[in-house]
Image: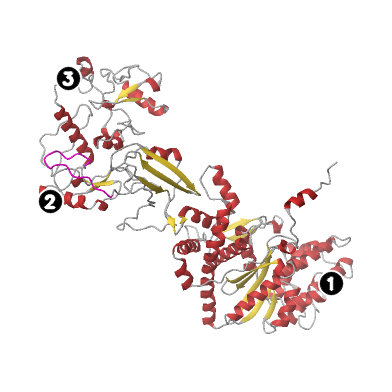
Amino acid sequence: MVRRCVVSGCSNTANDELNISIHSFPTDVLRQRTWEKNVQNTRAKWSVKNPRTTYICSAHFLLDDFEEGPILMVGSGIDVTRKRILKPSAVPTLFPTPSQIRQGTGDFATATPPAKRHRSAYFEKREKTQVLDSLLKPRLTADGASAAHTSTACSDASDDPMQETPGTMTSACQTDPVKEKKKPQRSKGVQTKPREKTTGTPIERKLFQDTGSQCNIIPTPKKEVSPPPSSSPSPPSSPGYHPPSSPDLSSSEGDYQRNSEPDMDEPVTPIHKEKKFIVFMTCLTRLLSWCHCPDCGSVDISTCHNVIGSLLVITLSCASCFKKVIWNSQPYIGSIPAGNILLSASILLAGATAGKVLRVMRTMALATISSRTYFRHQRSVLLPVVQRVWNMRQTFLLGTFQAEGRDLVLGGDGRADSPGHCAKFGSYTMLELHANVVIDVQLVQSNECGGSYHMEKTGLERSLAHLERQGLAVGTMVTDRHRQIAKWLRETYPHIEHLYDIWHVAKGFSKKLLAASNERECQVLRPWIKSVSNHMYWCAVSTPFGQGAQIVAKWESVVSHVQNVHTGHGDLFPSCIHGRLEGRESHKKWLEPSSKAAVKLETLVCNKTLCKDILKLSGGSQTSAVEGFHSLLIQFAPKMYVFSYTGMLCRILIAALHFNENANRVQGVTKAGEAMYSIKYPKGRKGAAVLRRVLESPTYEYAQELLEEVVKECTDKENVEAEFAVEPVIVPPPLCAEFPHPEKSDFVKQHLSRFKR
């Protein structure tokens, strides 16, 4: 079936001699409706029945409506299947007037065979060259430059083809010295008006609009084509012109070329900050279909794909001259594809798990690395980098404290990787309470110290020994009421003032008081639980440091207070100092003297062990910041997942880097300058509202520093290690090492199920 244009008075068919092509209507409803309305200007009440079999010719489109690539390839003498491709936004706008339709004249009349137009082949060729020149040359702004200057610029540009970047061309190098044109002519076949040429300084113009392409598969050709005689018109394939969609196949067979070097005139973006995109294989194949060999001009290019993790390697081979080039979708960092190592580093720095992230990528059918590759990167590259960055920052912190010359006030606490007494890993955190920074973290595996119960004490021993080797003096140590640690500090470091955190002591006492209130005739104790807990805080905070006996006297006075007796408590604290009770405190029911509830409360308050702990309560610094760090650590190392020793160590150190960078954030303010607060309902308060400050958003500069060190580790490992040496991590043997390991085949034979009949 002959494909004809549906515009009234046109009826053109495809004709290569006249540069007329036929295009079907779009399937998109909105675009199809726009085309239909425009055609109705020549054919009233006309409508599209089947867009796939309804056509309109190229004479009704502007030149800007077509893709430039195929037009340039045709002008270069390259045979392409589709010589004219409409842009997705193309709309027909050129239509004949009613008088032209009636007379059958104008540019939109039916195409006439070449024999009847009486135009020579030379005239046709010259007209095509003029139209193509108008596409390749922008309108120059400078006038009056000599032809000799233009010729010199063309010669300079053609001498060194490497000066030209892919995707751009120097307009002065595309033709011979420019001559003044007379009245510009218009081609009826293409329906464009060539621009007038004016001499001027050569400028560069992009052939395609830069929309942020992912990579450049078009290296600059190394061989130059001999220029044509100066007497003949210079076609677009003259020296200095390099088609933007033609990869270089001039390298010898077997050469392995990676991505071309970046332009030194442009600022180089670090590889870890460079934008990355998701490219579909169909789109990439469509791009490669425009390739041709710059040596022989053949379009018979075969491609071979190879996938290495997230890296795509494409080998393009010319079937005519047997030249080939290898293109990589990403650069290399040392000997590792950049996408592979940066993906592994990003998973670790974000606190994500490799299994879930890689599963997400596989669900999307994204080419990605395997779990085995991730753990290899973590062990060989990421762990040394994280350890080196942490050691550098830790050395700076400890050096700062040494310069201050003061005794450190430390807060310490341990954390198990899983609840209960079956934990595998235990970490101990040492935090300088006045500066609010983590200065040391230690990771302990349970089989290193004889069981999970001893991991906290072992971590403290290692941490204090490390600080002692650095020449730092510890003055005060604030911890929870860990009996094993208290005894060890008392015997090993008697000069260190060991204090207890109030929250831990108050929490333990509140639990005992809550259990007592569930007993018979003791329910009256429940309204007093919070008040007694607050009283413990007041006793420690209101007493000067070093007067532990007075803290105990204040604490024991609560037994008389709950019985409505406010005087005669003792010599150190004779009477209550509160005023008249108001509000909730005035409505509480007082305990009856000698009642079961009063006796139970007195037994708990005056417990000898508790009173000894009250003596050592810290009225100043607390370990709440340590608990905050442990909450942050859950984001990097959740307790519901199992990590290897190196994985757990990396995540603990990264969490410490994150905490130190964001621990002293200031409170956020509104546009009006008011402090920002939020209301929370934590589980521990059993639904009670809590007012909290809203801090500024956290920063992640440490992550960028780690990524920079990853690049250095992969490219210049020897110099990095010489500058800042890191001791290798000694990984303890697994927990199952002390158990026998039977042969799998024998174990399968011995296996019996309890439910087998």
| Percent position of residue 672, x then y | 47, 58
Residue 149, numbered circle: 2
Q: Are marks 3 and 1 in contact (CB under 8 Å)?
A: no
Q: Residue at x 54, y 65 (%)?
A: 386
Range covered by the magenta-colored residues: 222-237
Residue 139 in the figure: left or right of residue 374: left
Q: Give the main secondary structure of the magenta stretch.
A: loop
- Name which of mark 3 and mark 1 comes first in the sequence: 3
**Quarter of image, res 131:** top left
**The magenta stretch spans residue 226:** yes
Between label 3 and label 1, give the one nearer the viewer: 3
**Quarter of image, res 349:** bottom right
Residue 18 in the figure: left or right of residue 218: left
Q: Quadrant of the C terminus?
A: top right
SS for callout 1: helix
- Name which of mark 3 and mark 2 comes first in the sequence: 3
Q: Is residue 151 above or below residue 459?
A: above
Between label 3 and label 2, give the one nearer the viewer: 3
Name the kind of residue labelled 2 in the image.
His
Q: Is residue 148 above or below residue 523?
A: above
For label 1, the residue is 602
Q: Quadrant of the N terminus?
A: top left
**The magenta stretch spans residue 717:** no
Residue 345 in the figure: left or right of residue 488: left
